[in-house]
């Protein structure tokens, strides 16, 4: 898996200023260790990309926070409600989060990754020697 392949499959990460190759490579390396190719089979690359995209999206949030004087790495959950003056909005976060997913619920890439990982990790595994 290469940064160019990830960018081809997920063009939202095409900006090399926000997502330099060194950062993409680092998260691809981490993601590679999280995906067991025996279980993921032909979807191994997708699993690696989803895990890497999850981390890249969090990294972008941290970079944005730091650029405006905020605290990078501050943990916030999904927005449940927000109001400005007389206008307010709230979201049903339970509709788009996975039970007991914690950190993986922070991005849509994380929930997609964990949803698939839970399916692939269920049950026994038979290896033919």
Image (cartoon, helix red, strand yellow):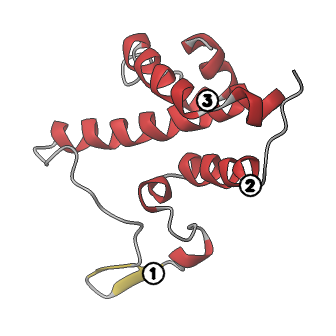
Residue sitting at x 48%, y 19%: 29
Q: Quadrant of residue 21?
A: top left
Q: Is residue 118 left or right of residue 58?
A: right
Nearer the observer, 44 or 55:
44
- The residue that mark 2 highlights is 122
For label 1, the crowd category at 10 Å Cα-Cα, with few meaning under 14, some 14 to 19 and many 20 or more, is few
- The residue that mark 1 highlights is 90
Residue sitting at x 66%, y 31%: 36
Instruction: Work out whether mark 3 precedes mark 1 in sequence or the reverse, and give the earlier one.
Output: 3
Q: Quadrant of the N terminus?
A: top right
Q: Quadrant of residue 77?
A: bottom left
Count the numbered circles shown.
Answer: 3
Instruction: Work out whether mark 2 precedes mark 3 in sequence or the reverse, and give the earlier one.
Output: 3
Q: Residue 48 bears which disc, if any? A: 3
> SS at mark 1?
strand
Q: Is residue 91 left or right of residue 60?
A: right
In the rendered image, residue 26, in percent from the top left (x then y), is placed at 40, 19
């Amino acid at each position: 898996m290469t940064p160019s392949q990830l960018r081809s499959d997920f063009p939202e990460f095409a900006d090399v200023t926000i997502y330099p190759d060194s950062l993409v490579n680092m998260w691809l390396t981490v993601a590679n260790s999280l995906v067991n190719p025996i279980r993921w089979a032909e979807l191994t690359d997708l699993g690696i990309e989803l895990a890497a995209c999850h981390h890249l999206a969090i990294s972008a949030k941290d970079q944005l926070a730091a650029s405006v004087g905020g605290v990078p790495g501050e943990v916030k959950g999904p927005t449940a409600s927000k109001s400005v003056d007389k206008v307010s909005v709230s979201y049903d976060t339970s509709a788009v989060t996975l039970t007991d997913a914690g950190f993986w619920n922070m991005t849509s890439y994380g929930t997609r990754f964990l949803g698939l990982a839970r399916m692939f990790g269920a049950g026994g595994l038979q290896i033919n020697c």
